[in-house]
Image: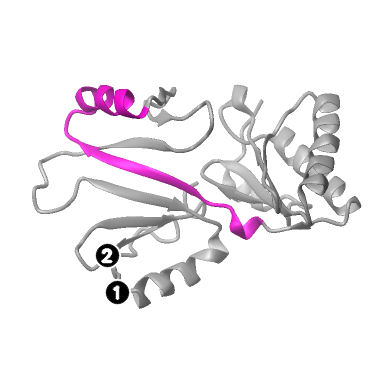
Amino acid sequence: METLTAAQIAGQAGLEDWRVVRGALRTSFATPDMSAGAELVRRVVEAANEANHHPDLGVRYSRVLVDLVTHDAGGLTLKDVEMARTISDIAAGLGLRAEPEVRQVLEVCVDALDIDAVRPFWEAVTGFDVDEAGNLVDTTTGSGSLWFQQMDAPRPQRNRLHVDIDVPLEVVEGRLAAALDAGGVLVSASSAPAFWVLADPEGNEACLSTSAGRD
């Protein structure tokens, strides 16, 4: 099945409740209590079984988190678009409000000269699994991931670990302002809107990333 880019997803109707964040369609539905969340999950599971296309679901007391991606295609497809619309209809029927702006993904990036040499250490200390791209992913609980960035020369003048925070595009402006107000520095915006590089007052770096500008 043909995969879709983030730009192609953005051009689809009926996805107002959803955002592409780190390669998946993601949203959250606010719930007044866990019982309401459980009912949403029950109905979504019924629809997913009928369509034979299953989202990842996370239930909290005040929200239900939903992630969609077509794993056997290695990306987003029309199956995800159709299921997202179905889930939005289910949530609307229950009177639940979507809050896609709260979704984000946190990753740690390890800069390495020899990725194959350093990956086994991080695999051992995290207990994560190696995916097809060579990244480390917590496939059991989804608690986090690490990816490895190829260096072409040693960089003793800066840290070689940085944090990536993937967020919806509409969130970035506020995050940037808050980070700068908190004493941060904008290191580079040359790759925006794909990502902005920031640093804390001691030079530790973080990237605010979006799905925009990556196609």
Picture coordinates of residue 62, whole percent (x, y) = 70, 54
Density class for disc 1 (Cα within 10 Å; few <14, some 14-19, many ≥20) is: few
Residue corresponding to mark 2: 200
Name the foreground residue: 107 vs 86: 107
Q: Going 23% across and 68% down the picture, which residue do you hit?
A: 201
Residue at (42%, 73%) from the top-left corner?
Answer: 178
Q: Name the amino acid type tagged 1.
A: Gly
Q: Position of residue 67 (x, y in %)?
A: 64, 40
Identify the residue at image location x=37%, y=36%: 146
The Cα atoms of the two marked residues, 1 and 2, are separated by 7 Å
**What is the quadrant of residue 160 in the picture?**
top left
Neighbours of disc 2 within 10 Å: few (<14), some (14-19), many (20+)? some
Residue 181 image point, x, y percent: 37, 77
Name above or below for residue 139 compared with residue 86. above
Image quadrant containing the N terminus: top right
Horizontal relation, residue 32 to residue 195: left or right? right
- Compare residues 116 and 4 and report the one nearer the observer: 116
In terms of depth relative to the viewer, which is nearer, 135 or 214? 135
In magenta, the rendered stretch is 100-126
Disc 1, SS: loop
Queried whether the magenta region covers residue 106, the answer comes back as yes
Q: Is residue 19 left or right of residue 152?
A: right
Q: Is residue 140 magenta?
A: no
First in sequence: mark 1 or mark 2?
Answer: 1
Q: Inspect the image, locate mark 2, and give the three-letter code of the amino acid beneath it.
A: Asp
The residue at 23%/28% (across/down) is 115
Residue 207, compared with residue 71, is above or below; it is: below
Residue ID for mark 1: 183
**Mark 1 in CB contact with mark 2 (< 8 angstroms):** yes
- Return the residue found at the far bottom: 181
Q: Describe the element under mark 2 as helix, strand or loop.
A: loop
Q: Position of residue 145 (x, y in %)?
A: 42, 36
